[in-house]
Amino acid sequence: MKFIIGNWKMNGNTDEKDALLKSLKNSRTKNKVVVCLPFTLLYGNDFGITLGAQDISEHPNGAYTGDISGQMLKDANVKYVIVGHSERRLYHKETNETTRAKATAAIKNGIIPVICVGETATDKNAGRTMSVVKKMLLESVPQKGEYIVAYEPRWAIGTGKTPTYEEIASVMETLHKALIGIKRENIALLYGGSVNQDNAKQIISIKNIDGLLVGGASLKSDTFLPIIKSIE
Ligand code: PGA
């Protein structure tokens, strides 16, 4: 079983959500499909598809205007939450420390965090990809509990560019070994960044990859379903 996690970012409305979830329900797959929606679309899940959120507060409750707690997500029946996405790191200055605190808050509420790590174009061009992603991983993951790690090179997100399959394979090996080093060999590893129906099958066949995190192509069934079907 592979994970295919869609990340809608700040897109979509109720009709679009219903259309996608309905087509996912009819598509029957043995893989684990999750759709991470904006907060306002999390309630009202008529199709039995597993839903995720895109952020969570590190705090349990209180005076944090605009934030959403783990308890609230649990109340909305959310099962997964993306933490440390590069857009959160870039636009909201979230750090590895914040990411770890958010992942811990999710686990405390029975929600599985999908912890994102990935190098910038500058890191890549300076030959620092491995050291950067390893550091991000080790500083962002919580000490205990179930979680998923997604490798998303920042420069590959929404750009149509992806690393070569060899490059993805070597980052995955680095992450896999680092997780073994902290005795977490059973953590699922995903790849994300410009995944589409033409590259999904090959990416998923790379060693140590347990799934995909899909942004733009997860918004509509005509682009998301072919990805899911291609890896059956
Ligand atoms: P993308 O986004 O598939 O549109 O590149 C992936 C992500 O940001 O999770």
Image (cartoon, helix red, strand yellow):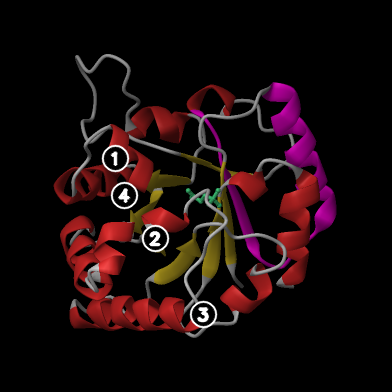
The residue under the point 55% across, 35% down is 37
| Distance Cα–Cα, label 1 vs label 4 | 24 Å
**At which x and y percent is residue 186?**
37, 77
Q: Which residue is mark 1?
A: 90
User: Which quarter of the figure is the C terminus placed in?
Assistant: bottom right
Asked if residue 85 can be seen in this view, the reply is no
**Amino acid on which the number 4 mark rests in the picture:** Ile
**Quick one: label 3 or label 1, which is nearer the N terminus?**
1
**Quick one: label 3 or label 2, which is nearer the N terminus?**
2
SS class, disc 1: helix
**Amino acid on which the number 3 mark rests in the picture:** Tyr
**Amino acid on which the number 2 mark rests in the picture:** Pro
**Quick one: label 2 or label 4, which is nearer the N terminus?**
4
Q: Are marks 2 and 4 in contact (CB under 8 Å)?
A: no
Q: Is residue 20 left or right of residue 40?
A: right
SS class, disc 4: helix
Classify 121 as above or below 200: above
**Amino acid on which the number 1 mark rests in the picture:** Leu
**Quick one: label 2 or label 1, which is nearer the N terminus?**
1
**At which x and y percent is residue 169?**
44, 82
Q: Which residue is mark 4?
A: 107
| Distance Cα–Cα, label 2 vs label 4 | 25 Å
Q: Does 171 lie within the magenta span?
A: no
Q: Is residue 174 left or right of residue 24?
A: left
Numbered circles on residues, count: 4
| Distance Cα–Cα, label 3 vs label 1 | 26 Å
**At which x and y percent is residue 43?**
58, 26
Specify the label residue 144 is tagged with: none
